[in-house]
Image: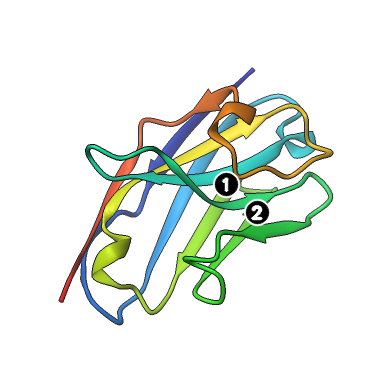
Amino acid sequence: QVQLVESGGGSVQAGGSLRLSCAVSGNAWNTYRMGWFRQVPGKEREGIATRRSNGFTNYAESVKGRFTVSKDNAKNTLYLQMNSLKPEDTAMYYCAADPRGYMPSLSEADYNYWGPGTQVTVSS
């Protein structure tokens, strides 16, 4: 079992950058698949980035080329670097983990563990 806590959210102007962090505690998370999701009130949670245990990454079309997921094993932290932010990126952002690390996934249903979220607001 793992526990996840996101940080790094905040307010930024369009075109700016933010880096979100997800502190991970628990055993064997290096073998887990990890994901970043976001949700706007009244809408479904959207998977935007996923990282397989072997390092393979995949991104939603809405963020491809602008967002990058990375991992620091020594710090037990997953990151989401967000560049060229747009007002439509405004959302609550969540980190997620699942022990089925062999398959990446942008589907909410494929993750068992979730952080409480961090808010990102992008103004025009």
Sequence-wise, the earlier of marks 2 and 1 is 2
Horizontal side of 26 relative to 120 (left or right) equals right
At numbered mark 2, what does the secondary structure look like: helix, strand or loop? strand
* Residue 105: percent from left, percent from top: 67, 42
* Residue 46: percent from left, percent from top: 45, 45
Q: Which residue is mark 2?
A: 72
At numbered mark 1, what does the secondary structure look like: helix, strand or loop? strand
Relative height, residue 119 to residue 44 (above, below): below
Q: Which residue is mark 1?
A: 77
User: What crowding class fits label 2: few (fewer than 14 Cα within 10 Å), some (14-19), or many (20 or more)?
Assistant: few
- Disc assigned to residue 106: none
* Residue 69: percent from left, percent from top: 59, 60
For the residues labelled 2 and 1, say whether their Cβ atoms are less than 8 Å apart: yes
Choose between 120 and 75: the one closer to the eye. 120
Instruction: Please report the residue visible at 42 percent of the width from the left and 55 percent of the height from the top.
Output: 20
Instruction: Please report the residue visible at 41 percent of the width from the left and 39 percent of the height from the top.
Output: 45
Camera sees residue 76:
no
* Residue 34: percent from left, percent from top: 64, 41
Kindly identify the amino acid type of the residue bearing the numbered disc 1. Answer: Thr
Q: Residue furthest front?
A: 43
Relative height, residue 54 to residue 62 (above, below): above
Kindly identify the amino acid type of the residue bearing the numbered disc 2. Answer: Asp
